[in-house]
Amino acid sequence: MKLSQEQIQQVEDYLNNKDVEYIDLHLEVLDHISTAIESEMTENEISFNNAFEKVKTKWNDTFSYKSSYWLGTSNGGSKLFIDHCLKIYKPITFKMIFGIFLFVSLFYWSVKSSNIDLLAYKSIINYSYIIISIMYVLLTFYWKFKIKKTNLKSVYSYLYNKQIVVSFFSIFLFLVLDSFNSQQEFKYSKFLMFTLFVAILVIGYIFYKSHLKAVSNYKKYQLK
């Protein structure tokens, strides 16, 4: 049994009251709850209102407060929202850590096994470091501007603002401290940070593009 537009609006009002404001999560939960209501009405032959009340009872626990060290304990929200963020963020973080570890290890092994003198390439490395740093700053704020311009919030825009933009200040601090370093030897910590820049840019781009896709899907839904 398909719900009417009026009934779907009641479900939307319920989600709005629960502050499910992120458009991708809103559409996903709307679909799940609507399907559950339809099943209750068909299987138990009950009215929409009774079916809706039964489904709300099952979903109430998902709107309880939760926080996670993964996202920062101050960035709490409903269990539904935080779990959805973690479902996206944790796999990407594990892949990033593994990728950085593998790349740095291979780089270290190739340098040591080939007896390459990295000091001979110090100027190239430093210029590359500066270029990546500038790209990081410019792209971070350009993507943030493009996300804000949509005037819509998604889980991806939340993750972008809380994880990508915030990391900018940590990297800026590292750049300032590193500028006072006058040591001449090649530092693998600097190469590690260089690799981290690239990894964060890739993740930021994924969040940025995913947000635009969520906005596109939401606008298509509104046109129905």
Image (cartoon, rainbow, N blue to C red):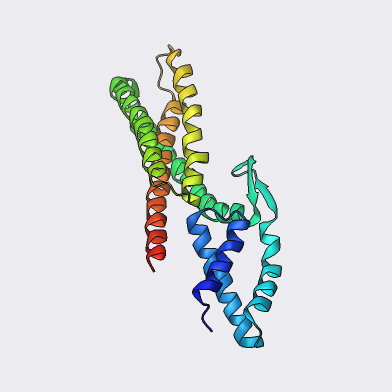
Q: Position of residue 133 (x, y in %)?
A: 37, 28
Q: Residue furthest front?
A: 6
For the N terminus, the image quarter is bottom right
- 92 lies left or right of 58: left
Quarter residue 37 falls in: bottom right
What residue is drawn where x is 65% and y is 73%? 52
What residue is drawn where x is 43% and y is 26%? 190
Most foreground residue, 180 or 122: 180
For the C terminus, the image quarter is bottom left
Residue 2 versus residue 85 in the image, above or below: below
Q: Position of residue 84 (x, y in %)?
A: 56, 56
Q: Position of residue 57 (x, y in %)?
A: 71, 69
- 77 lies left or right of 125: right
- 153 lies left or right of 209: right
Quarter residue 123 falls in: top left
Q: How many marks?
A: 0
What residue is drawn where x is 63% and y is 87%? 43
Residue 180 visible in the shown view: yes
Residue 210 versus residue 172 in the image, above or below: below
Residue 165 versus residue 21 in the image, above or below: above
Residue 198 visible in the shown view: no
Most foreground residue, 89 or 77: 77
Residue 28 versus residue 92 in the image, above or below: below
Q: Position of residue 185 (x, y in %)?
A: 41, 18
What residue is drawn where x is 53% and y is 71%? 8
